[in-house]
Amino acid sequence: MEQIRVRSFTPEIRKKDEESRTVTFVASDFSRDTAHTRINPNGWDLTRFNKNPIIGYNHDIYGGWSGNDVDKVIGKGNAYIERDELLVDITFEPASINPLAEKVYQKLLFGSLNAVSVGFIPGEGHWGEKDEAMGKDNATYYYDRGHQLLEISVVNIPANGNATRKEIEEEMTYLRSLAPKVEEPAPEPEPQPEDRSVENGNKVKLLKAAASAALMLNQ
């Protein structure tokens, strides 16, 4: 089963175009988040998203996960990389087909909503070094390349900006599972007691030969 991860970053709206109902967000950058990860902006695979550019509300769009209300899909997006940032142009559905999309859009214009969050499948990555190594106080996991963007959601509170201790611990457990498995060396065989039967047998033969020689001399 594909492991879907969710990440949010410092909210930043770059542009609003009310005529086209389009808002441009910074969806991701290379900053370290509260899940102790950094995502390489140039490692994103946007193919899957741009073929099905779903914009959701609070990630409530995965059928069988937390619901599949069609109106939780509130628009379409266009994702691209610019100056080491993942940007997305979100065009919101009109009020005539989706009142929720209209409400979210108006809240963005008003300023009471201003954040997005990405849903993605991780690709290749590695743990940091020194104080960023796995198990250290500043442990940091780097997503290097091949992270597939699935969807982007407008959110009330960015998940990473309000992560609970339990959520962070669960994320760290998942990240530790990505570490390469190191096989422990097979234990060395225990030393076996030395077989001295042959040696003892030779001593017996020598003693018998000596006794026979002494007997012959005395005759």
Image: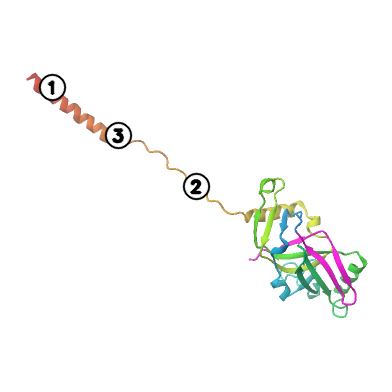
Task: Say whether marks 3 and 1 touch (CB < 8 Å).
Answer: no
- Determine which residue is flagged by label 1: 214
Bounds of the magenta segment = 1-29
Q: Is residue 156 left or right of residue 204?
A: right
Q: Find out whether the residues at labels 2 and 1 contact each other: C-beta distance under 8 Å.
A: no
Disc 3 and disc 2 in contact, CB within 8 angstroms: no
Closer to the camera in the image, 95 or 132: 132
**Quadrant (top left, top right, bottom left, bottom right) of the C terminus:** top left
Tell me which amino acid carries mark 3: Arg
Q: Earlier in the sequence, mark 3 or mark 1?
A: 3
**Outermost front residue:** 83
Residue linked to disc 3:
196
Residue 11 lies left or right of residue 175; in this view the side is right
Q: Secondary structure at mark 3?
A: loop
Res. 18 image quadrant:
bottom right
Cα distance between the residues tagged 3 and 2: 32 Å
Looking at the rendered structure, the secondary structure element under dot 2 is loop
What amino acid is labelled 2 in the image? Pro
Q: What x and y, as percent, mark residue 89?
A: 81, 71
Q: Quadrant of residue 154?
A: bottom right
Which residue is found at the position 47% from the left and 44% from the top? 187
The question of residue 2 being in magenta is answered with yes
Within the magenta stretch, is there residue 188?
A: no
Please state which of the two labelled residues, at mark 3 or mark 2, is closer to the viewer.
Answer: 2
Could you tell whether 156 is left or right of 215 in the image?
right
| Lateral position of residue 178 relative to residue 105, left or right | left
Residue bearing mark 2: 185
Mark 3 / mark 2, whichever is N-terminal: 2
Residue beneath the point at 9% across and 23% down: 216
